[in-house]
């Protein structure tokens, strides 16, 4: 089965750049999607198809995907960006696959 | 504005049954597959089940196959999840989420998600 690996936690200083990674075998050949989930709330799509932002998502959120790692980058991190972030792909064998999630802390 | 609203969660004993509903609005419901995704307390997201737009194709995670049944009523813009033989490990918040499919790219994602409904299975 296809698996996605995320770090449990990432910390970033206020105003700096946070990078959250999602590892998978040749993940660069797949489209990766990212969700933000704040405590007590439902997940919200922040990046789809590696690099695309839905309407309403700040330009500070960007994505990239190559080789065995996809990355969600949050520039000029704000306190309101504190949340859990999940990557997701569709795999022909495993179907709907989520990463384990990364907790972002803004210091 | 696209919206999904779950209901039907609650406390149930191990071995019992429960039926979840998801009411959709703001989009052409029958044009989209919909999934159930769950989140156990303090844990990550786990895909549970999906149904095609017409309701003729259904898919299940191994952990629930044979115990859960997904269905939809397109005349009422509503999705269902019938859960039976419930176990303690089924305790979770259950979200419904609309699937965006790009078949030519071999990919799909979820947008939007409902607010979730909590299912607690007591042992």
Image: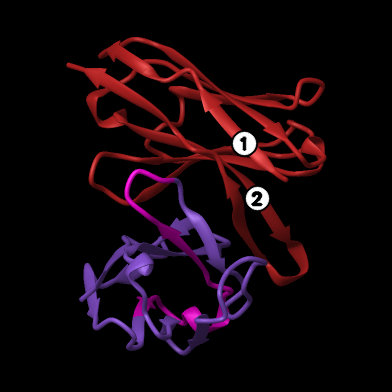
Chain colours: A purple, B red
Q: Are marks 1 and 2 on the same chain?
A: yes
In the picture provided, is A50 more to the left or to the right than B93?
A: right
| A100 relative to B37, above or below | below
Is residue A12 highlighted in magenta? no
Residue B118 is situated, as x and y percent measured from the top left of the image, at 37, 27
In the picture provided, is A97 more to the left or to the right than B77?
A: left
Task: Please identify the quadrant where the C terminus of chain B is shown.
Answer: top left
In the picture provided, is B20 more to the left or to the right than B121?
A: right
Check disc 2 and report its element: helix, strand or loop: strand
Residue B41 is situated, as x and y percent measured from the top left of the image, at 25, 39
Q: Is residue A16 or residue A3 the one in the foreground?
A: A16
Neighbour class for label 2 at 10 Å: few (<14), some, many (≥20)? many
- Circle 1 marks a residue in which chain? B
Instruction: Report the residue at 36% width, 17% height from top.
Output: B10
Instruction: Report the residue at 74% width, 27% height from top.
Output: B77
Q: Which residues are magenta?
A: A20-41
| A18 relative to B1, above or below | below
| A19 relative to A93, above or below | below
Q: Quadrant of residue B63?
A: top left
The residue at which mark 2 appears reads as: B99
Q: Is residue B106 or residue A56 the one in the foreground?
A: A56
What's the distance in space between the residues labelled 1 and 2, CA to CA?
A: 12 Å
The residue at which mark 1 appears reads as: B4
Residue B42 is situated, as x and y percent measured from the top left of the image, at 23, 46
Task: Please identify the quadrant where the N terminus of chain B is shown.
Answer: top right
């Amino acid at each position: 089965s296809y698996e996605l690996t995320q770090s449990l936690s990432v910390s970033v200083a206020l105003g700096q750049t946070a990078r959250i990674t999602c590892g998978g075998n040749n993940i660069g050949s797949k489209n990766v999607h990212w969700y933000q989930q704040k405590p007590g709330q439902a997940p919200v799509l922040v990046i789809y198809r590696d690099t695309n932002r839905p309407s309403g998502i700040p330009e500070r959120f960007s994505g990239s995907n190559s080789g065995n790692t996809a990355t969600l980058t949050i520039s000029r991190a704000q306190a309101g960006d504190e949340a859990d972030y999940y990557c997701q792909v569709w795999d022909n064998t495993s179907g709907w696959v989520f990463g384990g999630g990364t907790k972002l802390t803004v210091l | 504005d696209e919206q999904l609203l779950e209901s039907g969660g609650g406390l149930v004993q191990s071995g019992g049954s429960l039926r979840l509903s998801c009411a959709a609005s703001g989009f052409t419901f029958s044009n989209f597959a919909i999934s159930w995704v769950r989140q156990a307390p303090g844990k990550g997201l786990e895909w549970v089940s999906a149904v095609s737009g017409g309701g003729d194709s259904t898919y299940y995670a191994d952990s629930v196959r044979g115990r859960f049944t997904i269905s939809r009523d397109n005349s009422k813009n509503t999705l269902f999840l019938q859960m039976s033989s419930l176990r303690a490990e089924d305790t979770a918040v259950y979200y419904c989420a609309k699937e965006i499919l790009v078949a030519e790219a071999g990919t799909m994602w979820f947008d939007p998600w409902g607010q979730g409904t909590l299912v607690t299975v007591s042992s």
